[in-house]
Amino acid sequence: MGKSRNARRGRGAERTVAERVDGGLAELIPDRDRPRAWTLLIDGAPQSHVDLDDPAYLSFEYQRRLGHVIDLAAPPGRPVRAVHLGGGALTLARYAAATRPRSTQQVVERDAALVQLVRRELPLDPGARIRVRSADARDGLAKVPDGWADLVIADVFSGARTPAHLTSAEFLDEVRRALAPGGVYAANLADGPPLAHLRGQIATAAARFPELALIADPAVLRAKRFGNAVLVASAHPLPVAELTRRAASDPHPARVEHGKALTDFTGGAAPVTDAVAVASPAPPPSVFR
């Protein structure tokens, strides 16, 4: 791991922290509007935003949508057992700890140097029951006991692409094994025109879960631009009506597709297996400008 580079900017003691981690150059950029809030970038690609004073605040669109899934995974305030594949700045684990006190959470993040940086610069609440393991996401998931998790959230990117081995039906077999009978799986997916990756991921999830919903910006669903979509899956009916209401009322409104409309959206795409899996497409450079 390279030496860190601190550069003062903005007001007061705010500074940008830049440090080499396993995945590239990590930068923590202070939020000029929120005194103890930071955005994490890896090689210039935004990964996470976290507010240490208000961990229930979610800035990024896709994280707000995953926050809705966390909110609706169990009755309000009830502790859950959650597995987070991909850590970033631990934003969603902090969110669940703040909104569902006494939750027990496991975070699997391959980049050990990034974990060290985040722990040092953006320390966790010592009372939060969050265990962070430095391991490959699929290897870490394999160590979760059968039926342990109420919630599994996948938000894994190597650079700006989801690794191929986290896109297959065999990976989702591991997710289903780890989930409790009423558990929920949610994945942050990224794709752009012609949405072949996204359609394949929906078809793959449909081969393993009877209940699905997709939350995304309408322009992404129409293949007008590259962006994120949150796929939600379960063995039990999902709270589609409430997800729809919350997504529509966000600062950047999203649409929720499910049922026949979601099946039609896949356009006959085939499920992805380990034998044919590829990483998600790289975003165009304009996405991060």
Image (spheres, helix red, strand yellow):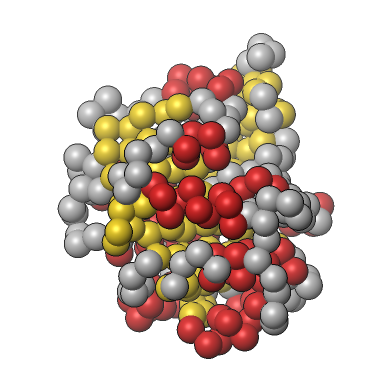
Which residue of the protein is positioned furthest toward the right in this rendering? 285
Percent coordinates x, y for residue 55 in the rendering: 35, 43
Taking the spot 47% from the left edge, 39% from the top edge, the residue there is 141
Question: Where 7 falls versus 148 (above or below)?
Answer: above
Question: Where 167 falls versus 245 (above or below)?
Answer: above
In the rendered view, does 282 fall on the left or right side of 86?
right
The total of numbered circles placed on residues is 0
Quick one: quadrant of the N terminus?
Answer: top right
Q: Quadrant of residue 24?
A: top right
Question: Where 95 falls versus 142 (above or below)?
Answer: below
In the rendered view, does 278 fall on the left or right side of 7?
right
- Viewer-closest of 64 and 7: 64
Q: Is residue 172 visible?
A: yes
- Viewer-closest of 92 and 211: 211
Percent coordinates x, y for residue 211 in the rendering: 43, 73
- Viewer-closest of 266 and 23: 266
In the rendered view, does 20 fall on the left or right side of 209?
right
Taking the spot 36% from the left edge, 29% from the top edge, the residue there is 131
Taking the spot 56% from the left edge, 50% from the top edge, the residue there is 171
Percent coordinates x, y for residue 20 in the rendering: 68, 21
Taking the spot 58% from the left edge, 44% from the top edge, the residue there is 156
Which residue of the protein is positioned furthest toward the top in this rendering? 3
Percent coordinates x, y for residue 253 in the rendering: 50, 74
Q: Is residue 53 visible?
A: no
